[in-house]
Image (cartoon, grey):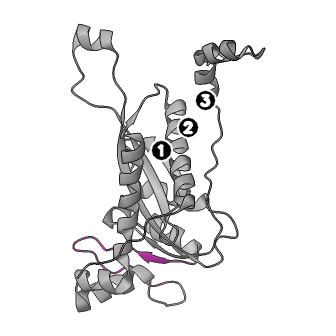
Amino acid sequence: MLSLVQLLKLSIQIPHYSTLSRRQQTLEVRLPRSSSRTPRHLVVDSTGLKVYGEGEWKVRKHGASKRRTWRKLHIMVDAQTQEVVAVEMTANFVGDSEVLPDLLEQLDEHDQVASVAADGAYDTIQCHQAIRNKGADALIPPREGAVEWPSDEDGRTHPRTAIVQRCAEIGRKAWKQESGYHQRSLAETAMFRIKTLFSGQLKNRTFAAQMVEAYLRVGAMNKMTGLGMPESYSVS
């Protein structure tokens, strides 16, 4: 940048890259996303992002570490617009189910939620309660050997118990087709797009800067999504 400014003979200051690196850690990223007049159908997924490199000297002196360092990126996608409406990055030891309530809290107050689809890792009381608090249906397949949960205080069957009963009646595969659970694959598609566009590695070294880097990637992808998505058709 400095060489370009000098070439243009402009009298402006160019910050050093180290200054940008320090300021990046405190940058607040807001996801660009479109508003929805209809209740959203949300899908959730997570993936690992590798922390970029270990340093040439360290590898040459001690060799590459046997344990790779990862960060987990959790996203919540609107199935209609395919935009990421909530994002969270955590250490690799944080469970997926622990993050879902935080993702829901990132939604705007006026956002209405019709359903939330997630895989069996989110089949916990905490996740189901967070989804119920939003007035939405939980499309989460029960784990193998799942038992029915107690009824509510007013005697109504718990929604998760209704899923267990329905799966026992028609089978898990039929329930997934009946409930629309398979739209969860849109979250996996969004993860693939993030890694294809920006790679699956993080280049910054501090956790705060890595968070900003990951959120900026998601925000940039939302911008691209807002410009238009390809239309796909099934071929018989």
In contact (CB < 8 Å): disc 1 and disc 2? no
Residue 123 visible at all: no
Compared with residue 132, is residue 59 higher up or lower down, i.e. above or below? Answer: above
Q: Which residue is mark 2?
A: 212
For the record, the magenta segment spans 136-151
Q: Earlier in the sequence, mark 1 or mark 2?
A: 1
Q: Decide if residue 88 is on the left or right side of residue 139.
A: right
Q: Decide if residue 157 is on the left or right side of residue 130.
A: left
Q: Could you say which is closer to the camera, residue 125 or residue 43?
A: 43
Q: Which residue is mark 1?
A: 89
Mark 2 neighbour density, 10 Å: few (under 14) some (14–19) many (20 or more): some
Whether the magenta-drawn stretch holds residue 224 is answered as: no
Q: Could you say which is closer to the camera, residue 185 or residue 110?
A: 185
- Residue for point 37% across, 72% down: 232
Residue 83 visible at all: yes
Quadrant where the N terminus is found in the figure = top right
Q: Position of residue 139 (x, y in %)?
A: 40, 76
Residue 24 disc label? 3
Residue 215 disc label? none
Whether the magenta-drawn stretch holds residue 146 is answered as: yes
- Residue for point 36% across, 40% down: 200
- Residue for point 31% across, 74% down: 142
Q: Position of residue 224 (x, y in %)?
A: 53, 54
Mark 3 neighbour density, 10 Å: few (under 14) some (14–19) many (20 or more): some
Q: CA distance from mark 1 to mark 2?
A: 9 Å
Q: Quadrant of residue 138?
A: bottom left
Q: Position of residue 236 (x, y in %)?
A: 22, 82
Secondary element type, mark 3: helix
- Residue for point 25% across, 92% down: 169
